[in-house]
Image (cartoon, helix red, strand yellow):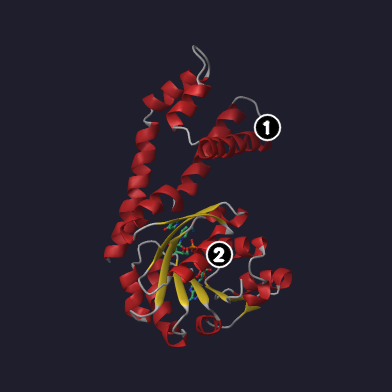
Amino acid sequence: MEQRIGFIGIGNMGNAILQGILASNIVPGTQIYVYDPQLDKGQALNQSYSINNLESARDVARESDIVFIAVKPNIIVDVLNDIQKELKKNTIVISIAAGVTIKTIAKCVGYEQKIVRVMPNTPALVNAAMCSITPNTEVTDEELTIVESLLNCIGATEIVPEYLIDAVVGASGSSPAFVFMFIEALADGAVKGGLARKQAYKFAAQAVLGSAKLLLETGKHPGELKDMVCSPAGTTIEGVQMLEEKGFRAAILDAVEAAIKKSKDLSEK
Ligand SMILES: NC(=O)C1=CN([C@@H]2O[C@H](COP(=O)(O)OP(=O)(O)OC[C@H]3O[C@@H](n4cnc5c(N)ncnc54)[C@H](OP(=O)(O)O)[C@@H]3O)[C@@H](O)[C@H]2O)C=CC1
Ligand SMILES: O=C(O)[C@@H]1CCC=N1
């Protein structure tokens, strides 16, 4: 890919996308420009991949054809106002912020700027991200394809209308945290049953990974796959009954709903 890619902010999520892109080799490090106030974050990558560590967000905006804004939602407006004069007409501004609308972004960088909202997740670090993509009307089909191919290098993508991004936050942006809690709890249970801690994480995580793969690759309904595990009068159905009694499904549903609500609240501010 010939485009120069910028990153403003390389905290948890910016760094995960950046590392995923670097590992995929789609863009050489020399075509990547980053700024984060903690310069050491970029310096480590500079040694391994020869990326360009710049001294300000404005410098990154000036150098980039596609620029990821990966700062927290509460400072994104300040950052966008700061870089606005440095953007070229065709620069694609990608925001990964939860709850910051295309309209809010356009108010800062101009309604004619090419803007894409992306909702990624941290599995980007291991090239297993799920990203939603929402372009504004200034983005051409060709440019959208470029953004898609960039993000497909770090996982899977789906194009969604803007009003569904809050739901994506619940389903895949925030949900890795819920899944890690689930894995941690699975492992705690196994440790209680006598398994060594390290092995417990491996068994639990591989079970989650394998189950997700089975669902995606067979396309079967999750209920059918669950039924395949439950032998009559066996061990699994005992656990399933316990999860139903403790409100497992309702708890997950409520957690997703709470994340969606927060994302909506942020965009109404
Ligand atoms: N974490 C996740 O799983 C996901 C996050 N997101 C979105 O990603 C964005 C970033 O979140 P996350 O990575 O978790 O947050 P982090 O706090 O981990 O990362 C933000 C980074 O931006 C840096 N920063 C602060 N001010 C500036 C500035 N003026 N210019 C450049 N960089 C700056 C911060 O430095 P310092 O720490 O010194 O302030 C930090 O390194 C948010 O908008 C969030 O909604 C979206 C999907 C998933
Ligand atoms: O917690 C957050 O606000 C961000 C957005 C989605 C995942 N992390």
Callout 1: 10 Å neighbours few (<14), some, many (20+)? few
Looking at the rendered structure, the secondary structure element under dot 1 is loop
Disc 2 versus disc 1: nearer the observer: 2
Above or below, 131 against 4 in this view is above
Above or below, 232 against 208 in this view is above
The amino acid type of the residue labelled 1 equals Ala
- The residue shown at (60%, 56%) is 125
The mark found on residue 179 in the picture is none
- The residue shown at (59%, 36%) is 210
Residue 104, how many percent across, how many down?
Answer: 32, 72
- The residue shown at (33%, 48%) is 258
Ligand 2 in which quarter:
bottom left
Residue 38, how many percent across, how many down?
Answer: 58, 73
- Viewport quadrant of the N terminus: bottom right
Residue at the disc numbered 2: 150
Above or below, 116 against 128 in this view is below
Furthest residue to the left? 268
The amino acid type of the residue labelled 2 equals Leu
Q: Is residue 248 left or right of residue 199?
A: left
Q: Is residue 261 visible?
A: yes
Q: Nearer the viewer, residue 104 or 136?
A: 136
Q: Is residue 150 left or right of residue 50?
A: left
The mark found on residue 196 in the picture is 1
